[in-house]
Image (cartoon, rainbow, N blue to C red):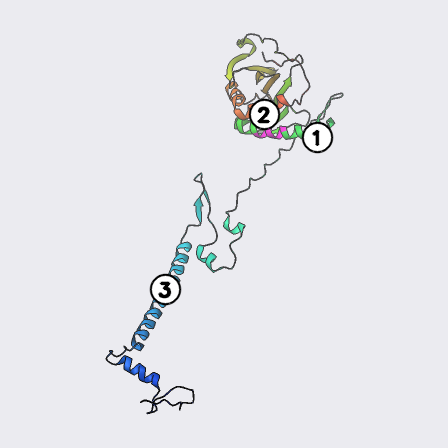
Amino acid sequence: MDTFTDSSSGGETAGEDGVPLVRVAMERAAEGAPPLPDLVPAAVAQGRSRRTRARAAIGAGVSAVVALGVFSATLPLWGADEGGAARPARSWSAAARATEATPPTATEATPPTATEAPRAVRPPVHVEPSPGESSMADLPAAERARQESFQQKVARLLDELLPRGLGTVRPVDLAVSRYQTAEDGSTFPVVLSVRRRGDGGEGPEPPPCRDNPVKGFQCKQAMLPGGLKARAVTAVGNSRGSQTITGVDVTFDYRDSAVRLAVTGDDATMVSAPVSADQLLAVAADARFLELVAYADSRPMEEKDGAIRGG
């Protein structure tokens, strides 16, 4: 019969030969089983494979960043906006953005916008008023500023639309309807008058448009945009001996106002106005000119008077 003694220091039960019973039991259970495989070589191989894949991933990431930076560096400095016009492209690259701690500011990311250069002011021509005559200097400050602003717009537009032979158009500080231009020592008065009719109705019917070669009088009718009936009159303005000068006068009605656009010759040098009736009618038909007329009609700047007619 087997006897059991407790001879181990840890309290493990052992047989008569001193071998722990647990070990004996395990050895008996493992009898006939195949030997366990060696796990060390497989673990080493797996570790090397993982290290190789990690290095490959890091290399691919660095290559991608470098390639992105090279691509961004080769982008053109100018792009195109929605309308097809050239504009500055962004001044930062995707590679730079990836390495910066903060994103680019709005100034860096957004192309600068072009600002319109301020238009030069046409210095007005000073004309001393006659005794008892008023001038723009007598107007309230706000109204004077409004009329001077209107004169600047008119002067710039007429300077663009009138023939080059007239020279630079400048406003005259005597009245909002007065302008003048000078070329080769001659001065040509210019008038743009938009005056409300005193009765508020239509003006009297003008006389028939007929030429009079004896008096140097020519009349031409035309239709302006919006169904506006206009007439251009070329007539002798002054004569000195055998010399005569002519001017051109275009008139038409616009809503409640009588409109007059005229260019006359220089009485001192006896030089006729270097503009034809067709040229002045083309100015009156320009949409920008009619916009200025519409403003003057809705916000009158001249005193009411009878209709101003030519011919």
State the SS at label 3. Answer: helix
Instruction: Please indicate whether residue 179 sits to the left or right of residue 37 in the image.
Output: right
Q: Which residue is at the front of the view, 304 or 29?
A: 29
- Callout 1: few (<14), some (14-19), or many (20+) C-alpha neighbours within 10 Å? few
Nearer-N-terminus badge (1/3): 3
State which mark lies toward you, 2 or 3.
3
Is 207 positioned to the left or the right of 302 in the image? left
Residue 303 picture quarter: top right
Dots 2, 1 in contact, CB < 8 A: no
Q: Nearer the viewer, mark 1 or mark 3?
A: 3
Does residue 57 show up? Answer: yes
Q: Which residue is mark 2?
A: 292
Query: Residue pushed farthest right?
Result: 132
Mark linked to residue 57: 3
Say which residue appears at 41% left-offset and 58% top-offset.
Answer: 69
The amino acid type, in three-letter code, at marker 3 is: Ala
Q: Which mark is residue 142?
A: 1
Instruction: Give the magenta-colored segment's residue range.
Output: 150-156
- Sequence-wise, the earlier of marks 2 and 3 is 3
Q: Residue 268: horizontal and vertical position, in percent? A: 63, 22
The 10 Å Cα crowd at callout 3, few under 14, some 14 to 19, many 20 or more, is few
- Residue 173 figure quarter: top right
The label on residue 106 is: none
Place of residue 221 in the rendered image (x, y in percent of width and height, measured from the top left): 51, 13
